Amino acid sequence: MSNYLSYKYKNLVPYVPGEQPRDRKYIKLNTNESPFIASGHVSLDSAIENIMLYSDPTCLKLREKFAGIFNVGIDEVMFSNGSDEMLNFAFMAYTDKLTPAAFPDITYGFYKVLCNVNNTPYTEIPLKDDFSIDVDDYVNLNKTIFIANPNAPTGLSLPLNEIERIVKTNPNNIVVIDEAYVDFGGETAVPLIKKYDNLLVIGTFSKSRSMAGARVGYAIACEKIIKDLNAIRYSLNPYNINSLSMLLAINILDNNDKVLGNIEKIIENRAYLTSELQKLGFETLESKANFIFTKTDKMSGKELYLKLKEKGVLVRHFDSDRIKDYVRITVGTKYELDTLIKKTKEILGV
Ligand SMILES: *Cc1c(COP(=O)(O)O)cnc(C)c1O
């Protein structure tokens, strides 16, 4: 880093995205993207024709379409450049020295990064030994709570009544539920926004809607929270959704049947992968996401990850202590999973 960098960022530890190597063609099961195309036919002509104009900062057409499908008001939703951006808005809006953040010790790595960049103190609350969340830990916490539900990288999910207990017992604090994976079997907290003005649900088109490259995330909450977040958004980047991504997002909402079909396939493939790995002695957590978290006692998570990579299959391994035995595997197509299983058998010599 240069000597010019502000003291504020001298100790920054940036997020490390899952690797995207270009050295060869990999079966890519490491970053939880969808293996399926979701859109029907989308004509980019009209968007390109208007590309000299700024995109609509209010995202009105997209919000109207979205609000109809998600059964919320158009002032109860807003969009961001991927949900990572929305998470940052939420950390900026609702955490500071007096209002620290809290989240599980094993969860989405970005939360910690966003605390650091925003100079927010945080508490990591240990998950139970089985990696589930002890909801009692979050009752009357007096902190801004961030919970990924289903959680990453475990894939475990909390039922809606447990989420409601957390929201209800923290009336003086915002509770953020990150629903990046909710469509793969979790229960959404969106209906609760009508009842609680401290609930903020954040979601993304990157996973179930096959749009990771377009960068579209959203927030659903009561109007006042959406106003807060828009104030932050308009202070940083009012045109955060570009017009091409907006068009693609509207198109994908028009193709919801296709999205639902793809989700069904992922759920089917997840069961298949889990049972095939079980035959090889793997222990897998019960996933409600488009990935599984699994381990074998025959080798460490790191060794398995490295050997699979050598054979052209990418999975994700995390070095932190409690989960270093595991690998996280994105649920891909049947062909991708069969390749992964075949290579795993070769590695284990069975
Ligand atoms: C993938 C992911 C996100 C971010 O997705 P974007 O591509 O930025 O929308 C947010 N939270 C969790 C838990 C994720 O796994």
Image (cartoon, grey):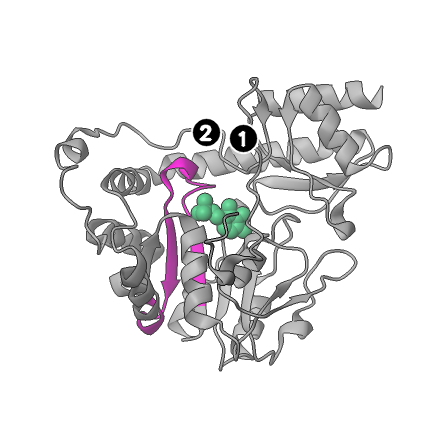
Query: For residue 149, what is the image quadrant?
Result: bottom right
Give above or below for 263 relative to 335.
below
What residue did someone put label 2 on? 36
Residue at mark 1 to residue at mark 2: CA–CA distance = 18 Å
Residue 350 in sight here: no
Image marks 1 and 2: residues in contact by CB distance under 8 Å: no
Q: Is 245 or 62 nearer to us in this picture? A: 245
Element on which disc 1 rests: loop
Query: For residue 269, what is the image quadrant?
Result: top right
Residue 91 screen position, x and y as percent: 47, 65
Give above or below for 82 relative to 350.
below
What residue did someone put label 1 on? 20
Element on which disc 2 rests: loop
**What range of the chain is rendered magenta?**
200-226
State which mark lies toward you, 1 or 2: 1
The stretch drawn in magenta includes residue 215:
yes
